Image (tube, helix red, strand yellow):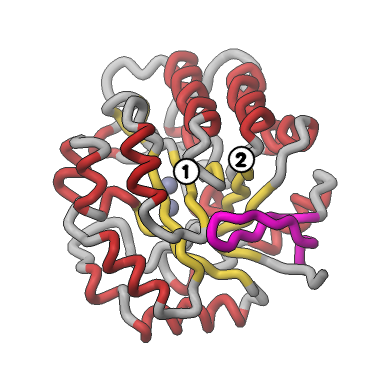
Amino acid sequence: MVAVLTDYHVHLRPDEGATPAERFFTGENADRYLAAAADAGIAELGVSEHIHRFSDALTLWRHPFWEEQAHDDLDSYCEFVRGTELKLGIECDFVPGAEARTAELLEARDFDYVVGSVHFVGDAAVDHQGWDIWDGSGDPDEVWRRYFESLAASARSGLFDILAHPDLVKVWGRAQPLPKRDLRHFYEPAVAAIADSGIAVEVSTAGLRKPVGELYPARAFAEMCVEAGAVFALSSDAHLPSEIGFGYDQAVPWLRELGVGEICTFERRRRQLEPLGR
Ligand SMILES: [Zn+2]
Ligand SMILES: [Zn+2]
């Protein structure tokens, strides 16, 4: 088998501001991303737009942020991506209580893979200042405990192929307090759920671009995953062509140091392990 690099957790447009789909879901834009991937030696490129940008998401959750953002048509997105060389993915939040509706929405489309995310704990977000979980009385032990419990539940739901940015709760780095306990205590339930479910753990270089300035997940988390026999997926969470493969010069050696020599590729939600490239 040929060694490969992947970038599966990729957005065709920025998160913020007025970014109409028509401007970004174009053959020209897809070509820009594919050219950037070719330059970076990434053979497997897929896109995974946020579920909350699609009006269909409101059948899962009616959070005010989603109500404000959900304008696009999910089937048009799928049809557009299928007309390109990109793999078809989606970044779908885990919405507790909406598991059956989420499964129905996902199974009705022929995605190559589904990236499962936890951005919200209750109504508050760990990575979004408009709905900041740290506003008011964010007790770090409580925030971290609840975040990783939700991450564990998302893995166990069986809805997703890839567990996105697994310790996103650290995104603000030193700008927010850390729990006093050893962080491995918080990782434990999530790692157990990863091992039981077999979900692929995303190594995301997005953390390198955020205040925390390190990969998702933390090294200790990744070591526990390796110990538990988990498999890994590699992505940049790019929102621009220039971010494709961002930080792979750090992430690939980091995976090798952990003893990880294979990464996951996906097609129509079937997973294969292939030798890690570069
Ligand atoms: Zn995300
Ligand atoms: Zn993303």
Q: Residue at x 55, y 38 (%)?
A: 166
> Are the residues tagged 2 and 1 within 8 Å (C-beta)?
yes
In the rendered image of this protein, does residue 239 appear above or below residue 202? below
Is 267 a magenta residue?
yes
Q: Residue at 78% across / 69% down in the picture? A: 3
Residue count near mark 1 (Cα–Cα under 10 Å), binned few <14, some 14–19, many ≥20: many
Residue 122 against residue 129 in the figure, above or below: above
Q: Nearer the viewer, residue 237 or 138?
A: 237
Disc 1 secondary structure class: strand
| Magenta run includes residue 43 | no
Q: What residue did someone put label 1 on?
A: 116
Name the residue located 41 percent from the left edge and 15 percent from the top edge: 139
Left or right relative to 121: residue 165: right
Q: Residues within 10 Å of mark 2 (few under 14, many from 20)?
A: many
Q: Classify mark 2: helix, strand or loop.
A: loop
* Relative image position of residue 155 (x, y in whole percent): 54, 33
| Residue appearing at x 49%, y 73% in the figure | 86
Q: Amino acid at mark 2?
A: Ile
Magenta range: 262-278
Q: Amino acid at mark 1?
A: Gly
> Within 8 Å of ligand 1, the CB of disc 1?
no
Closest to the observer, 271 or 32: 271
User: Taking the image as drawn, is residue 172 in sight?
Assistant: yes
- Judged by its main secondary structure, the magenta piece is strand
Q: Position of residue 163 (x, y in %)?
A: 54, 42
Q: Which residue is mark 2?
A: 199
